[in-house]
Image (cartoon, rainbow, N blue to C red):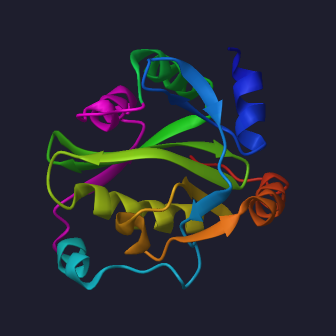
Amino acid sequence: MDIPSIVQAYAHGYFLMTDDEGKLGWYSSRNHALIPLDNRFHRPKSLQRVLNQNRFSVAINRDFLGVCRGCADRETTWISEELINVYLQLNKAGWAHSFETWQEDKLAGGIIGMAIRGAFIGESMFYSIPDASKVAMVRLVEHLRKQKFILFDAQIQNPHLARFGAYSINDREYKSLLNKALSHPCSFL
């Protein structure tokens, strides 16, 4: 797989996953989970105290490989070594990024995703210290707002994302919003 083809596929609403047999393939969804970048974004009240305490610092791409490995470190995972290598190539080419939380010199959590113009497509998140991925989510939304991103695609809705105000839209609505985001120049860094 070459980098331009991968970026084009993401720009058309596809994403990479490894199946149960270890084969890397392209997937799409009929419904897409979006994290709102406007006032619909919700900070859970229980998290506000943690945010106020400033227990975590944030960084971008400080330990991209560490975040990939953290995201893959689960009982069942769709992130294979082959996919990690693809992510590393995308990171070196400036498309994939990690948004990380640190506690002193320890990687505490993070989110990996693709930034294509005004769209951020979140791939996965992890934590090794409680609340670290939640803080990463809040700080990433703040960062995307500051950089004027239009779309934060979380791909698949789940109860954890719903706590932040994530909502689902159908594929037709998603492609329209994605096209709008792709016509909007942004820089993740």
Q: Quadrant of the N terminus?
A: top right
Considering every residue shown, the one lying at the far front of the view is 21
Question: What residue appears at the point 16 percent right and 62 percent down from the top-left corner?
Answer: 55
Residue 13, given in percent of the width and then of the height, sits at: 72, 45
- Queried whether the magenta region covers residue 173, the answer comes back as no
Left/right placement of residue 32 relative to residue 178 reads left
Relative to 4, say whether 137 is above or below.
below
Is residue 61 or residue 48 the one in the foreground?
A: 48
Asked whether the viewer can see residue 26, the reply is yes
Relative to 145, say whether 79 is above or below.
above
**Chain part drawn in magenta:** 53-78
Residue 2, given in percent of the width and then of the height, sits at: 71, 15
Left/right placement of residue 73 relative to residue 159 reads left
Relative to 162, say whether 69 is above or below.
above
Question: What residue appears at the point 26 percent right and 85 percent down from the top-left corner?
Answer: 45
Residue 68, given in percent of the width and then of the height, sits at: 37, 31
